Amino acid sequence: MPTPTPPSAPHPAPPKAPEPPVIDVRSLFGGGREVVLLHNGERYHLRITANDKLILTK
């Protein structure tokens, strides 16, 4: 007669990732409508549209 397998132990939950920082875009734009972000030597333009949306372009 085969030996029954014991139930497997529950796996611990993976640790939660830290919350990303929250930045008010007004602090980035300083009253303007466009900022340039540098990432890995590349320039990206972040703009506030006429409809008050954000657009990120390279």
Image (spheres, rainbow, N blue to C red):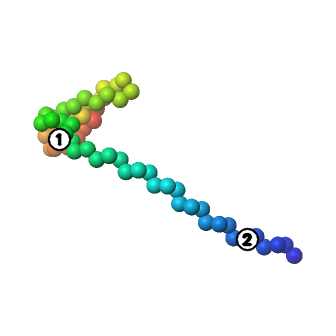
Name the residue at 53% across, 60% down.
Answer: 13
Dot 2: element: loop
Q: Nearer the viewer, residue 58 or 21?
A: 21
Q: In this figure, what is the number of numbered marks?
A: 2
Q: Secondary structure at mark 1?
A: helix
Q: Residue at x 82, y 72 (%)?
A: 3
Identified by mark 2, the residue type is Pro
Place of residue 49 in the rendered image (x, y in percent of width and height, measured from the top left): 17, 39
Q: Is residue 25 above or below residue 40?
A: below
Q: Which residue is mark 1?
A: 26
**Residue, far bottom:** 1
Lateral position of residue 39 relative to residue 17, left or right: left
User: Is 58 in front, or is 17?
Assistant: 17
In the rendered structure, the answer to whether residue 29 lies left or right of residue 41 reads left
| N-terminal label among 1 and 2 | 2
Q: Position of residue 7 (x, y in %)?
A: 69, 70
Question: How many angstroms separate mark 1 from mark 2 (CA)?
Answer: 58 Å
Work out which quarter of the rendered image holds the N terminus and state it. Answer: bottom right
- Residue ID for mark 2: 6
